[in-house]
Image (cartoon, rainbow, N blue to C red):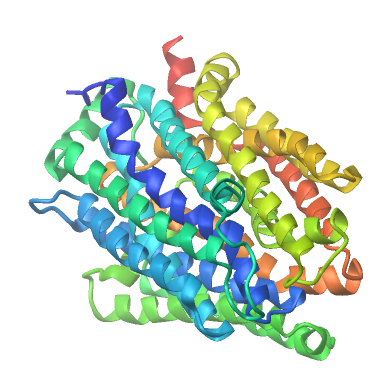
Amino acid sequence: MKKRRLSFWEIWNMSFGFLGIQFGFALQNANVSRIFETLGARVEDIPILWIAAPITGLIVQPIVGHLSDKTWNRFGRRRPYFMVGAIFTTLALFFMPNSPALWVAAGMLWIMDASINISMEPFRAFVGDNLPTEQRTMGFAMQSFFIGTGAVVASALPYILTNWFGVPNTAEEGIIPQSVKLSFYIGGVVLFLSVFYTVFTSKEYSPDELAAFEKAKEQRTGIKMAARSPVTAPQFFKQGVIWTLVGLAATLLIAFTGLGTQNGQLYIVGGLLLTFGIILLLSGAITGKTTRQNGLVGIMNDLLHMPRTMGQLAIVQFFSWLAFYAMWIYTTPAITQHIYGTTDSTSELYNQGANWVGVLFAVYNGVSAISAFLLPLIARQIGRKGTHAIALVVGGLSFISLYFVKEPTTLLIPMIGVGFAWGSILSMPYAILTGSLPADKMGTYMGIFNFFIVIPQILAASILGYITSALFHGKVILTLVLAGCSLVLGGLSVYFVQDRDDVYRLKRK
């Protein structure tokens, strides 16, 4: 018994919803820093305002993944979450550009990111559920195509509306320009329609069918998922004590060295470590009272028992997402300062630069969309690991080259390398990961895998403001150079990852 190979158009339909999800995500990435600055935020405060996004993902994705693993109703397993997330994200996109104050915009970012995560997390598991092993690279590449396509249009929307349709690109101080508002309205409509298109044109296997496929695969390949006993209460307590002490030590170190006075955002790191330790202690207390796992204990149990491949990929993801998070929050101030020579968010020159950043984001996302069809071909020749390593190193060198560019149009060249890396980040790690995951925990582990995306983002939000102001003396372009170095390290760390499907492929040879 084996999963049916899907046609090109069936994979197209099941991935189409990512067009809208990325439409909203790209509008957020390209314009939220601009909105914050318009509403009075200082450039060094932007990272902490963005902290809502990764923290939301850290909380929401594993919960949604765990719940979707347990869900089966007339709408399916993952599709109910697509629908709920799409509705709330659409509402958030309509409200975000109308925020009357900075604190409202920060709160709306939190709500918008939570809603996007509700839809986005099950989409990753959707590919693992529906496609056989040999089609998963194509499935995640198709998602990358729609991610890139949606982001191209969304990132360039303010520029298009201003230069092609004459929509005003400036406004009074503290007011979001009309071009940005209209872009968010269009994004809300596109997101809603595309996600619901996938919901009504795609089908899902039932939990019983997925279990049968998993059993048949183990018999066919001779490779079984490692069976591990649940984490005991003493084990939870041991891990909880360790992480709590680490969190306390980090917090005290920040306080006594004076780093907290210089950069209060660093306390977020210590606080998260403490919180993780307390959650493990709480899981131990619950486990000591009952043998029945609730959602929290189940997620923590799966986290501590994560497959080896996931742990290896975690290092790659750390360096990769640290780099791209830095790019999203710092490209607008970096380019307007380094190329356009202004930091005045009310000036025409600044807004021209901000619109050009939207074009740059459109270019790298366009390249990622095109590379979605190129990457599977390369992977067939040199493997998914080699493909991903090359893409990350090329992307890192492209980041670093931004420092040497002196005029706007030349910035388009390094964006090609950045887009190639981004296309690989959106597909290769997931294609490698799904081969090591049990079918009945696909959603949970996809949610846990998101930890290794948001943790570097939280770290970046906590330290990049300090690094930019104290070490780089406000030269924001140097932060993007640092991001490039991080991406190169990510490419080098791919060497240590084991691709379980590659092991099976070599075994058959």
Residue 311 location in percent, x, y? 54, 49
User: Which residue is the extreme one toward the top?
Assistant: 509
For residue 397, side relative to residue 87 (left or right): right
Looking at the image, residue 59 lies above or below residue 85: below
Residue 337 location in percent, x, y? 84, 61
Where the N terminus falls, by quadrant?
A: top left
Looking at the image, residue 100 lies above or below residue 154: below
Looking at the image, residue 112 lies above or below residue 160: below
For residue 266, side relative to residue 372 (left or right): right
Q: Nearer the viewer, residue 357 or 253?
A: 357
- Residue drawn 88% across and 61% down? 341
Q: Nearer the viewer, residue 486 or 474?
A: 474
Q: Nearer the viewer, residue 141 or 160?
A: 160
Residue 91 location in percent, x, y? 34, 68
Residue 171 location in percent, x, y? 62, 72
- Residue drawn 27% across and 20% down? 7
Q: How many marks?
A: 0
Residue 226 visible to an observer of this rendering = yes
Q: Quadrant of residue 466?
A: bottom right
- Residue drawn 17% across and 43% down? 200
For residue 315, side relative to residue 140 (left or right): right
Q: Quadrant of residue 60?
A: bottom left
- Residue drawn 33% across and 22% down? 221
User: Which residue is the extreme one toward the front?
Assistant: 166
Residue 455 visible to an observer of this rendering = no
Looking at the image, residue 276 lies above or below residue 394: below
User: Which residue is the extreme one toward the left?
Assistant: 74
